Image: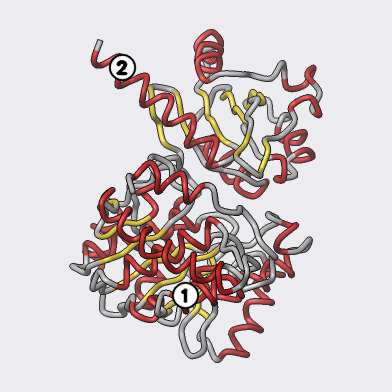
Amino acid sequence: MTIDEVLAAIHSRPKVGKKDSQERMTALLSALGHPEKDIGPAIHVTGTNGKGSVANMLSAIGIADGLRVGLFTSPFIVRFNDRFQINGQDISNDALVAVYERVQVALRQVENESDDQLRPTEFEVVTAMMFCYFAEADLDLAIIEVGIGGLYDSTNFLTTTAVAVITSVALDHQKLLGNTVEAIAYQKAGIIRSDRPTVVGLDMNPVAKTVIEKCCQRESSPLIVAQSVPFKTALAGDYQRGNTNIAVAAYRAFRPNVTDEVLGTGLMHAKLPGRFEEVMPGVFLDGAHNPAGLEALQRSIDARFDQPVMLVIGALADKSLGNFLNQIVEKRRLDVRLFNYQGIPGRPGMTCTDYDEKVFGPPLASVDEVIQLAKEKGEPVFFTGSLYFVADVRRQICQKKKYSAQS
């Protein structure tokens, strides 16, 4: 198979299955010989916001510590291969093809033996590929970012968790995780392991923290609350201070004797596209995709800019941003605009016509239109609302920059 054929096959998989079922993943991993048991010690990271940043910080610290580190994240921002990294290097196309072909054999077995009743989803297939790839990589540490929630997430088949991390808990993915912070916290606490430490953020929602504490007590898991640390990170945005605290606490839980020099060096080498990233002068990307994330982004914008800032929202329809967008539009220094984002297969974009055009202005339809409008108004501009949207915008801007450089 070619890399394009592999990517097409992966993306053609069902997007969702029965939400509380692990039967598909159980069958797939069994057909593969349980590679999840062979990936070495892991730090498992979940949270409504911040998990991608924390996972990338942990990977950078581990590399600075001289370890061989695997990193699994989602979704990808630059290219699909981003999701599987070893010591900061994306999986090669050849390796990606090979690992998919191995999983494909197992997929056919599962589907045939179940008379097509068990059809692993796209994310389950990707997770199985990660387990296979990492199991053969002789890792000292695997950093595994949860897809959604925790309890029923396909990454939660991990048997080698050394540290569980819950960065934050807020309302998001309610259809899958529950309609209350308490219910969502319970889902995220599903990654907690017996006799293994659990790390949470200093600013954890009190209701969520109570749920997590009870789960830790039940599992005899020592609960570590991240404290403020003096380290800086290369990742921009005021909200990264809290993520830095969590990453340091989690790595210290994994390697208690790690030096401050290693921690500091790693944090300053952390890289993560699409998080308060300036891709052109005055043009920023940030993957804030729910009310809590947008609040954190708003605070970071306030800390950096003392002028009006254009905030362009391209979101998925299932994000329930309506009331919150009406609130932030009242901030005089935020010029909030809506982007007519189409979404991804199975998850359509928000319907811009549901919002008052007198408040948000006419929906914007192209990246060029946004940048031109921002230039005319003399405002820095942030594209945000969905990581999928941010990834699309980033690719378009990078392609334009590459074309301009060649011209």
Q: Mark 2 sits on what residue?
A: 403
- Mark 1: which amino acid? Leu
Query: Which residue is at the far left?
Result: 66
Q: Is residue 351 left or right of residue 305?
A: right
Specify the quadrant of the image occupied by residue 59. Answer: bottom left
Q: Secondary structure at mark 2?
A: helix
User: Residue 54: horizontal and vertical position, in percent?
Assistant: 43, 59
Where in the figure is residue 240, as x and y percent of width and height?
A: 45, 51
Q: Residues within 10 Å of mark 2 (few under 14, many from 20)?
A: few
Residue 162 visible: no
Q: Earlier in the sequence, mark 2 or mark 1?
A: 1
Per the model, the C-alpha gap separating discs 2 and 1 is: 44 Å
Q: Nearer the viewer, residue 170 or 340?
A: 340
Q: State the image coordinates of residue 159 (x, y, percent, origin top left).
A: 44, 82
Q: What amino acid type should be assigned to the residue bearing mark 2?
A: Tyr
Decide: few, some or many residues near mark 1? Use Cα within 10 Å; few <14, some 14-19, many ≥20. many
Name the spot of residue 42 as percent of width and height, x first. Answer: 38, 74
Residue beneath disc 1? 29
Helix, strand or loop at mark 1: helix
Instruction: Say which mark, if any, is on residue 146.
Output: none
Quadrant in which residue 35 is drawn: bottom left
Q: Is residue 350 above or below residue 363?
A: below
Depth check: give the residue in front, 373 or 140.
140
| Residue under the image location 58 percent in, 71 percent down | 24
- Is 339 or 286 nearer to us in this picture? 339
